Image (cartoon, grey):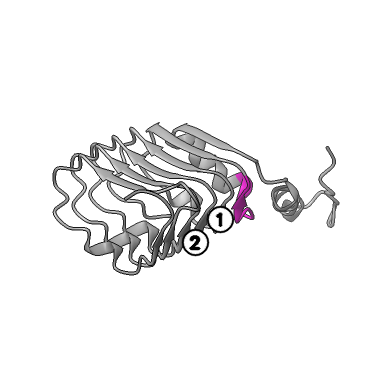
Amino acid sequence: GTFGVRKIIPNSPQESARTAVEVSMNCPCPVNLNYTSQAALNGFLTQYSHCTTISGNINLSEGISDLSPLQNLQSIGGYLAIENTALENLNGLSVLHTIGGTLAISNNAQLRELTGLSGLTEIKGALNIYDNAKLQSLAGLSSLEKVGEDWAGMSIEDNPQLMSLAGLAALKSVGGEL
């Protein structure tokens, strides 16, 4: 489609830089994200830095080791699945405040903490955190007030290094089973 690119200064070095910025700012945000490589995820920030909302789902797996390309993301309409990654933390998601579906964090062998989720206040679906061998703390969920609407609940299991649920102190409501 047309992205509304216009040439301001013909044949100048600034022209190509300005054109690239205008194209980026006018690209529609993708509905769903599915990344299995860090290089592909890095491209998200380059192409969609203006996107603060993803209306669909986000799947992050396998080769993902850094979430900073998602640093502008404030809300997700669907679910967020972070599974089988090389992540040690979730830094890069600090401005994310709402997830419209489930948050699933599972089978992340190197994940130690959830501090990158410090801005998250509501998960409308379930919260599932399981099989993260090195996860030691839920402190990153310290702003989370509500999990689940109706049936959706919370499941935290098989995280052998996790000794406390202290990071959930702000939680006021769980819609389903705990």
Q: Which mark is residue 5?
A: none
Q: Determine whether label 2 and label 1 are within 8 Å by CB.
A: yes
Which of these two is toward me, 171 or 23? Answer: 171
Kindly identify the residue that appears in the image at 72 percent across and 46 percent down.
28
Please state the horizontal and vertical placement of residue 156, each as a whole percent of the image: 27, 46
Q: Give the crowd class for mark 1: few <14, some 14-19, many >=20 residues within 10 Å.
A: many
Mark 2 falls on what kind of element? loop
Please state the horizontal and vertical placement of residue 79, each as a whole percent of the image: 51, 43
- Please state the total of marks drawn on the protein image: 2
Q: Give the crowd class for mark 2: few <14, some 14-19, many >=20 residues within 10 Å.
A: some
Q: Quadrant of residue 163?
A: bottom left
Please state the horizontal and vertical placement of residue 157, each as a whole percent of the image: 23, 42
Q: Which residues are magenta?
A: 47-55
Please state the horizontal and vertical placement of residue 107, each as a whole percent of the image: 29, 34
Left or right side of 159 for 57: right
Which of these two is toward me, 61 or 159? Answer: 159
> Hey, what amino acid is under mark 1?
Ser
> Hey, what amino acid is under mark 2?
His
Is residue 54 one of those drawn in magenta?
yes
The quadrant of the picture occupied by the N terminus is top right
Residue at the disc numbered 1: 75
Looking at the image, is mark 2 or mark 1 earlier in the sequence?
1
Q: Quadrant of residue 105?
A: top left
Mark 1 falls on what kind of element? strand
Residue at the disc numbered 2: 97
Which of these two is toward me, 132 or 177? Answer: 177
Residue 66, compared with residue 172, is above or below; it is above
Kindly identify the residue that appears in the image at 22 percent across and 49 percent down.
112
Q: Quadrant of residue 44?
A: top right
Q: From mark 2 to mark 1, how far is it between C-alphas?
A: 6 Å
